[in-house]
Amino acid sequence: MTMKKLRPGPNLGRFSLALLMTLLLAQAAPSAAKNVEVTASLGMVASAHPLASQAGVDILKAGGNAVDAAVAAAFAVGVVEPNASGLGGEGMMVIYLAKSRKAVAIDYRSAAPAAASFPQGLPSTGPAAVAVPGTVAGLCLALERYGTMSLPQVLAPAILLASDGFAISSTLALIILDNFEEISKEESLSKILLLDGLPLEAGQTLKNPELAESLRLIAAGGRDVFYRGELAEKIIAEMEARGGFITRSDLAAYRAVERPPVQGTYRGYGLISAPPPVGGLAVVETLNILERFDLRRLAPLSPRRIQLMAEAMKRGMADWRAFVGDPDFVRIPVAGLLAKRYAKTRAAEIEPGRASAEVAPGAPAREESPSTTSLSVVDASGNAVVLTQTISDFFGAKIMVAGTGIILNNEMKNFSSEGPNALAPGKRMRTTISPTIVLKDSRVWAALGTPGAARILTTTPWLISNLIDCRMRIQEAIEMPRFFPSGLELAFEPRLPEETVAALAKMGYSLVPREEFDLFFGGAQGILIDRKTAKRTGGADPRRDGAVVGY
């Protein structure tokens, strides 16, 4: 089935040639050490790529709401960041509707094929590592329930980018180079990522016409094209040819799920984050623990603040690993883990000036939520969306479905051998993604998220504490040096003061320096709304090709 090429109509604010060239040239050049904070009065999109951010803002200008813009930007970022997300992946979205004060989460996590079995251990890549993708179902569900525009309208920018191409950035060029050996073994991947057998370089054009055609099919036929129709048949053919587990019934049975988000408070601010089976619970629990300490009296990069945060983070992560799985398969003590009295118990375990080697999971009361990409959207009405989506590792399973331009995920490796995250047919695996919205007086105050594997669970509370405890601006909060605790080991960016590093070593931490603005720590994007002026300020991470666009 061949569809006519879709282009943004007059009401979609077509990319102007001058703006497009400016964005593309900026992508071809090395990224600056620091990014400029962006301010706007009405709508704003912060994502990992300027063209995805522009796609979302064009939708806002055309009259779309935050959900419309987020869906458009999510489809677009899957085109321009093919290493990190796309149609063959999955994710989680958190939405806050200002007028009704309603908070919801859309779970479009991938799911285990019914026949998947790994007696020799979970695979890290290849066809057996592919889980049933959720991106198309999740974005379509969000648009259907909370958007105002049609699927062809919000898909138009992504289709244009896939068909006409874009200049790749130095970051993407480096990622292609790092994965060159595996890419070169996959003919369909090589066709779009290599030129004359060599990796594409910064500034060269990446086109994916087969992906553009797949997006056109989805625009015309909706989610069923992917899960029951023409694209489903191509995915099944790929799985059968390579020995993957996904079947027609697996695809046909997949559904995105609307769930109540994880909610909490931190020093009078409301927290809305992503529910199990992902990481919002650990983020809120960590902040609950930190609330027991007066961090506002401490210098932002003081040894005491770093130690308190590292120890709180370790406890949040320990409980997340011990208790979190797919809520449709396991009972999770969400209320117990988020109880303030439980945080008091966990905070009491932290010894001043001493690193803890091992942190065991706690015993909450049973009372009744480096690949990947994240984006944040706020519209003129104060609605907000934050989503994080992924194909797991860079370029996922290193498999592109023939004739579709779709790169498949390798999410099966995220199951555990036992416990609440153990593999089961149809089960969704646990991951750390934690898109989060912060409220003040029931209005959106901040919308933020980050990729970064396990570092998501530490970066997200770090950003929120920077904003609330240290009263930083959004760009400053994002660019602050980061750290990641694991047992006694503390990985850190070397911009930490020397005296802080020395003091942390005396506390017992084994310090592991990383690079300046290290991609290891993800690439956060965020938007902050001034409560008095309603001005939106956006920050984008120099660790990634982040960009904020507003109007």
Image (spheres, rainbow, N blue to C red):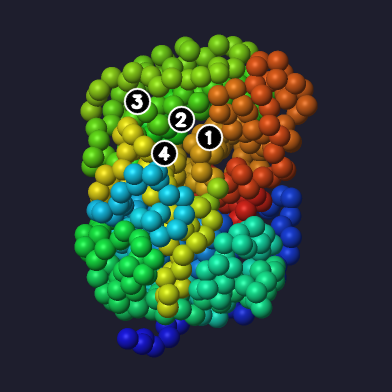
In which quadrant of the rendered view does residue 164 lie? Answer: bottom right
* Residue with the most extreme right position: 498
Instruction: Tell whether label 2 touches label 3 (CB within 8 Å).
Output: no
Give whichever of 69, 254 is nearer the camera: 254
Q: Amino acid at mark 1?
A: Thr
Residue visible at 72% across and 31% down?
496
What amino acid does circle 4 point to? Gly
State the residue position of label 3: 337
Few, some or many residues within 10 Å of mark 2 (<14, 14–19, 20+) = many
Q: Is residue 516 above or below residue 216?
A: above
Distance from Cα at disc 3 to Cα at disc 2: 12 Å
The crowd level at tag 1 (other Cα within 10 Å; few <14, some 14-19, many 20+) is many
Query: For mark 1, what is the residue?
Result: 458
Q: What residue does disc 4 label?
A: 279
In front: mark 3 or mark 2? 2
| Quarter of the picture holding the C terminus | bottom right
Q: CA distance from mark 1 to mark 2?
A: 9 Å
Query: Which numbered disc, 3 or 2, marks the residue that appears first in the sequence?
Result: 2
Residue under label 2, please give it.
317
The percent coordinates of residue 166 (x first, y second) are 60, 74
Q: Amino acid at mark 2?
A: Met
